[in-house]
Image (cartoon, rainbow, N blue to C red):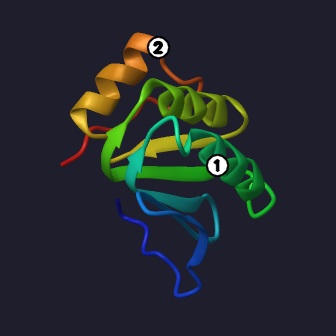
Amino acid sequence: MNDTPSATAQLLYVDHQLRIVCHPMPGPSILRLVGEIDATNSQALADTLAQARRIDEAFILDTGELTFIGISGARELIAFCEGGPTRLESVPPLLLRLLLMLGPPAADRPQRAG
């Protein structure tokens, strides 16, 4: 990713397995997902992503540090992408495969991790 995150990163959500950080930027802001998303926190993911739309309308969703995502979490990512301009970046191969099986997001095509 060529964008340099701002020094004003905002921690939007944290639990024992997931952290969501927003880096507000001119242009699309960066949302970084770190950790694991499963049935225990996929609703929190949906709620947090909905709140993020108050920060910016366009996002780069960096999923490069996700180590696990269940189907419920993948569906929430797809719903978020369909809700406004969002580009997925650093998508791990297994997440990319899952997203394509569920139906590609209406946003830009995901970019595979390094």
Q: Is residue 62 above or below residue 27?
A: above
Residue at the outermost bottom position = 7
Q: CA distance from mark 2 to mark 1?
A: 21 Å
Left or right: 33 with respect to 41? left
- Which residue does the image show at 42% across and 53% down from the upper left? 62
Q: Amino acid at mark 2?
A: Leu
- What percent of the width, then of the height, locates residue 24? 62, 71
Determine whether the residue tagged by mark 2 lies in a helix, strand or loop: helix
Sequence-wise, which precedes: disc 2 or disc 1?
1
Badge 2 density bin: few <14, some 14–19, many ≥20, Cα 10 Å:
few
Q: Is residue 7 above or below residue 28?
A: below
- Which residue does the image show at 67% across and 49% down from the upper left? 49
Q: Which mark is residue 44?
A: 1
Determine whether the residue tagged by mark 1 lies in a helix, strand or loop: helix
Find out whether the residues at labels 2 and 1 contact each other: C-beta distance under 8 Å. Answer: no
- Which residue does the image show at 71% across and 38% down from the upper left? 84
Instruction: Name the image quarter holding the N terminus.
Output: bottom left
Q: Mark 2 = which residue? A: 102
Q: Nearer the viewer, residue 80 or 38?
A: 38
- What percent of the width, then of the height, locates residue 21? 53, 67
Q: Amino acid at mark 1?
A: Ala
- What percent of the width, then of the height, locates residue 35? 36, 55
- What percent of the width, then of the height, locates residue 70? 41, 30
